[in-house]
Amino acid sequence: MNTKTKPFFLFLLIPLILSGCQSKTPAPAAQSQTLSPVSDTVHLTVWGAAEDEALLGQIIAGFEDEYSGQADFDITYTPQSEGHCTDALMADLENGADVFAFADDQLNTLVAAGALEPVNNPASVMESSLHEAVLAASVNDTLYALPLTADNGYFLYYNKDYFSEEDILSFDQMLSIAAEQGKKVSMEWSSGWYVYALFGNTGLTVGLNDDGMTNYCTWNATDGSIKGIDVAQSMVEIAGHPGFVSTDDAGFLEGVQNGQIIAGINGVWNAVAVEKVWGSSFGAAKLPSYTCAGKQVQMASFSGYKLIGVNAYSKESMWASRLAEWITNEENQMRRFLMRGQGPANIHAAASKEVQSSPAITALLEQSEFSNLQRVGGNFWQPVITFAEEILAGNPSGKPLQEHLDIMVTGITAP
């Protein structure tokens, strides 16, 4: 889902190995230098998620204290969704935020628009950040943004009162158990981000063409061991199962809270709320397999990262860069995890005991083997939603499933 912003926690294995032999990465030498502001007062605008207001308030206050002897600051925080950051920035790039958080799938667009300059201290950032997060922040091996989080994926939440560790390996088994109990297992089909889970590990492909904007897609393929129609037929069977419900974030949490949903596929941002309800029965794991073409197919996932960018048109670019570095340093990524439960992209913070003991992040680590970086153009989303809506509604148009698949792929690959 492009508003949440998707190989992924496999790289957490690296910090586990390295944490015992590496010391904390020192601050870049440039950070200790006194910087001269363009004007007597340094005016900066920061965009971040509305949910991060308290967190960013603390981080910005710390930045102002750190550099209090070098400049007077006037730093304004404005809520802005990471998923829609690019749209807002492109509306008035020269007057947009100096520093902004955004989802990694927007990087190519921002670079192509000239909104980002290469990062000043790439070697330092690469050394202190998880490898896949660096890849997500780079275009053609050039680092254009600072990695902030490495948790933008999804996994399975489940209530241990209903499911054993063996049950959660099979989506079919989970649906049967939920139906027997008069309960539901949830997954959001109103988003291509989650629907990808059913196509992503079948040999059917989707991704960006070399132009960085249009897509290729074989989800309607009529050959191979698993064909597009096989996935579509599996979706029909899942949609009609009494133990299944398709619902969004709000519906998932509501169902958990009222006891109707006992398992669901969702992201780490809801971990605190779900654990509060289920308590000691809270469980998290990699995604299960599902039946497709008579086989058990492991569900795939998109993985993603949140990044911090510095506007190439910022009038205070040097200070904006220092603020971006401050927001993404080890201490503040750890602060972000403790306050917001978001997985750090910093290699040392990611290796900390607190992060490694998080059930949600452990689940993401388990799922990493079956996840792929989200790289799709804008035409991907709506055709997938339309296709899934037809399936959920029981195919009211009466068209053959292959025709629905062909229509979807035509939309996805449109120029």
Image (cartoon, helix red, strand yellow):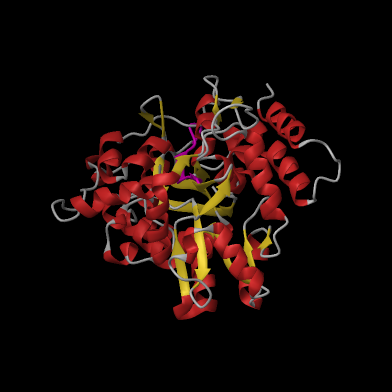
> Residue 11: x, y in percent?
32, 46
Q: Which residue ends up furthest to the left in the rendered image?
A: 21
Q: Is residue 143 left or right of residue 178?
A: left
> Residue 407: x, y in percent?
75, 30
Q: So how many labels did they put on this image? A: 0
Question: Which residue is at 50% across, 34% downward?
Answer: 107
Q: Is residue 304 magenta?
A: yes
Q: Nearer the viewer, residue 64 or 130?
A: 130
Question: Which residue is at 61% across, 33% downward?
Answer: 227
Q: Is residue 65 visible?
A: no
Quarter of the rendering occupied by the C terminus: top right
Question: Which residue is at 64% across, 73% downward?
Answer: 180
Report the magenta residues as a range.
300-314
Q: Is residue 344 magenta?
A: no
Q: Nearer the viewer, residue 319 or 354?
A: 354
Position above or below: 298 against 311: below
Q: Which residue ends up furthest to the front in the rendered image?
A: 294
**Which of the 4 image quarters holds residue 356?**
bottom left
> Residue 388: x, y in percent?
71, 45
Q: Nearer the viewer, residue 226 or 90?
A: 226
**Which of the 4 image quarters holds residue 292?**
top right
Q: Nearer the viewer, residue 190 or 50?
A: 190
> Residue 73: x, y in percent?
44, 52
